Image (cartoon, rainbow, N blue to C red):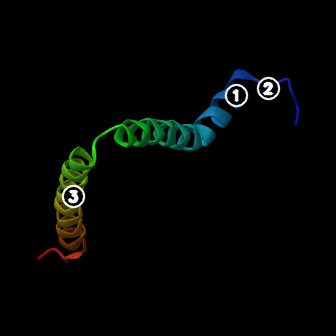
Amino acid sequence: MDEDLTSVEADQLFEETRPIGEAIHVLGQAEEVVAALDELSPAEQLRVNRAFSNALSILSEQFTQQTSSDEEPSA
């Protein structure tokens, strides 16, 4: 690969790889959350697991409703 990129080429490569960088960042944050959860007592872990489960259920339901309404033909 040519190491002498123009600023336009560099910007384009940055934009193309941005999703990868963001995914790596999110994984790093998830690792920190998991490490913090490991330090909780079993009872606290159970409470957090229930809260996450409830939140994911709500988000899943909202996403399902949103995608269903997006697929309905307009009158």
The residue to which callout 2 is attached is 5
Residue at left offset 63%, top offset 28%: 11
Give percent across and percent down for residue 18: 56, 38
Q: Is residue 75 above or below residue 27?
A: below
Q: Quadrant of residue 35?
A: top left
Q: Position of residue 68 (x, y in %)?
A: 21, 73
Q: CA distance from mark 1 to mark 2?
A: 6 Å
Alpha carbons under labels 3 and 2: distance apart: 42 Å
Task: Indicate the secondary structure of the residue bearing disc 1.
Answer: helix
Q: Dot 2: few (<14), some (14–19), or many (≥20) neighbours within 10 Å?
A: few
Contact check, label 1 and label 2, Cβ < 8 Å: yes
Answer with left or right where residue 62 lies relative to residue 39: left
Q: Is residue 5 depicted above or below 62 in this figure?
A: above
Q: Identify the disc placed on residue 10.
A: 1
Query: Can you identify the residue that label 3 sits on?
Result: 59
Which residue is located at x 23 percent, y 48 percent? 48
